[in-house]
Image (cartoon, helix red, strand yellow):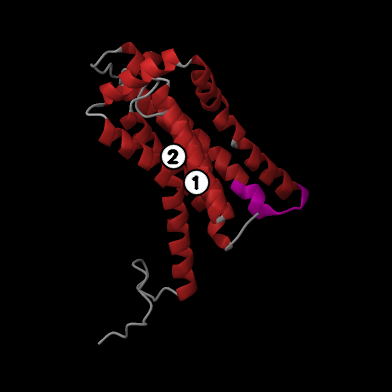
Amino acid sequence: MKSPNRPAPDLATGRPIPYTLRMRYAALAGHFVLVSLPLLGVLLVLVWVFDTEAQAIAAFRIHKWQNPGFQDVVRFITDWGNLAMYIPFLVLFYRGWKNHDKRRTRYALAYVAVQVLVCLVLVNLTKMALGRPRPETREILHHFLTLDPNYHSLPSGHTAEIMGSCLALALWLRQWRTTLLLGLLVAIMGFSRIYLNMHFPTDVFFGWLFGALAGWTTFVVGRGEDSTHHG
């Protein structure tokens, strides 16, 4: 009979996983969930309120026409939110370079490389391959293998980029309040893309998936798991 306190085995090696390591894995998973929940909650609300994606888009189209001031605020967020998220990683790189801290420098460089490969190259190749029309076109049929940006709706590049940034930063800092704030930023960015009629909710969901891939890849490649806390 197995002891109830016996550590769970590592699936790769078969050896027991130490308790502290299991707690670290659980904490990492918790930060991922927390940074994702606000956006997923917004998408679930849209599914519950509207029967179709087209209804949601139509409702937001009317609202933004009736509220140009609010539309300007949302547009400011969608235009500058991702750019602002590069500042923490620039600071991280500078501190690593100044203090000869290879961990910080490596993580910042890994972030840039992964964002380029996943959120720029992979996302845009997917957009061109699938050719889903943006909501503003009011078309239904996909234009596969197209360079026309009007048919680059799936996935949402802004959502992928903000999720990749926020998840990578959350996994580096591992501060619960900061992670929650980052999750709210992801949700606001994702909602802004729907509100401005640039993307359907499903585009934003798949953008979140690409961003999750980018964030975890940054963490693994940058070896953020080498320490229980970074700053």
For marks 2 and 1, give the CA distance: 8 Å
- Give the image location of residue 195, x and y in percent: 41, 24
Q: Secondary structure at mark 1?
A: helix
Q: Which residues are magenta?
A: 98-107
Q: Is residue 146 visible?
A: no
Q: Label 1 is placed on what type of residue?
A: Leu
The image position of residue 149, as x and y in percent, is 40, 15
The secondary structure making up most of the magenta span is helix
Q: Which residue is mark 1?
A: 167
What is the number of the mark on residue 211?
A: 2
Residue found 49% across the figure and 19% down from its top: 71
Does residue 150 appear left or right of residue 218 in this picture?
left
Quarter holding the C terminus is bottom right
Looking at the picture, tell me which residue is in the foreground, 143 or 66: 66
The image shows residue 39, relative to residue 64, as above or below, that is below
**Please, what is the three-letter code of the amino acid marked with disc 2?**
Gly
Residue 10 at x, y percent in the picture: 37, 70
Measuring 49% from the left and 65% from the top, which residue is drawn there? 24
| Element marked by disc 2 | helix
